Structure formats: C-alpha cells, structure tokens
Amino acid sequence: MTALLHHFSQYITLSDDLSSEISNRVKHQTFKKGHLLHDANKICTHSYFIQAGLLRLYFLKDGKEVSEYFCCEKEWVNSPRSFMQQKADIYYIDAIEDTTVFTLHVQDLVFLFNHFPEMERYARLSMGSMVGHFLERITSMRFTTAREKYTHFCETYHDIYHRIPLGMIASYLGITQETLSRIRAGK
C-alpha cells in the first residue's frame, strides 16, 4: 500500500482521511503470466496500479494482437475510454509476467473524486504524462523509420523493454518480427 500512497503523494498532498479512503477502497490482487485482466467485449470497471509485474494493453486487428502500450511497476492501467465512459471498446489487458496490483473500482474512484477535490488535481496532473506518451507515440508511428521507432521504443521503455517478448514489441512498432530482428542485429 505504501507504493500506491507514495504515487498519489507525488501529485497531491494526502490527508489522513484521503489515505484511509484509498486504503479501504483498493483491493490487492495477483495475476499469473498470460491472465486476461480485461476483455474488450466487457465494460472496464477497474483500474490497476501495478505493484510488481508487467501488463499490456492491446487490440485485435484481423485476428492478430496489436500491442498499444505496456505498463510496469508504479503505473496505472485500464481501458481508458471504456473505464471513463462505461462502454465496451477495443482493448484487452493481459499480464506479460506474474503481476501484483492494487485494483480500484470505477465507483470507488468516483467516490474519491466527489469527496476529495484534490483527486481532480491528481487526475489532471497524472493524465498529462499519459497524453504526452500518446502524442510521442503518434509522432513516432507517423514520421519515423522502423529503426527510429525501435530506438524510440527502447528510450520510452528503457527500464522494461528487455522484459517484453519480441513479437509484442514488433506489433507495438507496426513491423514484422523479422524486421525487428534485423534492426536489433544492426543490419
């Protein structure tokens, strides 16, 4: 719980009441490698703060998995549009390795927003980093070569890229696994 409360305290001042409510509303869960945390055919009702492990958000295109982003320790993950709008969308979430999380239900998050105004500030500030990541990804996908995309990926995910299977990296980059192998070999 300490890591989760510390995460919040990086953005806002945590009162004892808010700390207590967060602690009472989150649940601790563990998922095995390969576990599907969220199915795109369902509404995303939980957000996951990763204590240990690695999760991936992906969608299916012509029956193939396309990795959208990866989340590791001290990060939140959910299917953003589904979670916020409470509608099904295209994203799945799975565990790339055994993962331990703190889970927060959408209704508990709404409670925190309604009773603790500082949570609005937290949401605004923490979402800024996510928006920045997506803008960088869009620019990288549209205006760079495959080698530049891979370099950008390694810079963006410098702490975890070695933990991600090559096929998932290739799908994230929009290239074949063979092309990725050539890039990694320096050819």
Image: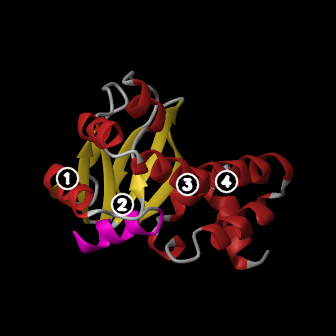
Mark 2 sits on what residue? 96
First along the sequence among labels 2 and 4: 2
Query: How far is disc 4 from disc 3 in space, using C-alphas?
Result: 11 Å
Circles 3 and 2, Cβ within 8 Å, touching? The answer is: no
Tell me which numbered mark, 1 or 4, is placed earlier along the sequence.
1
Q: Looking at the image, which residue is at 25% across and 34% down?
A: 107
| Label 2 to label 1: alpha-carbon separation | 30 Å
Q: Which residue is mark 1?
A: 21
Q: Secondary structure at mark 4?
A: helix
Going by the numbered disc 3, the residue's amino acid type is: Leu
Q: Is residue 3 magenta?
A: yes
- Gap in angstroms between the C-alphas marked 1 and 4: 29 Å
Assess disc 1: are there few (<14), some (14-19) or many (≥20) residues with their C-alpha within 10 Å of its C-alpha: some
Badge 2 or badge 1: first in the primary sequence: 1
Would you name the residue on which mark 3 appears?
125
Amino acid type assigned to the residue bearing label 2 in the image: Ile
Q: Amino acid at mark 4?
A: Gly
Alpha carbon distance from label 3 to label 2: 27 Å
- Residue sitting at x 63%, y 48%: 131
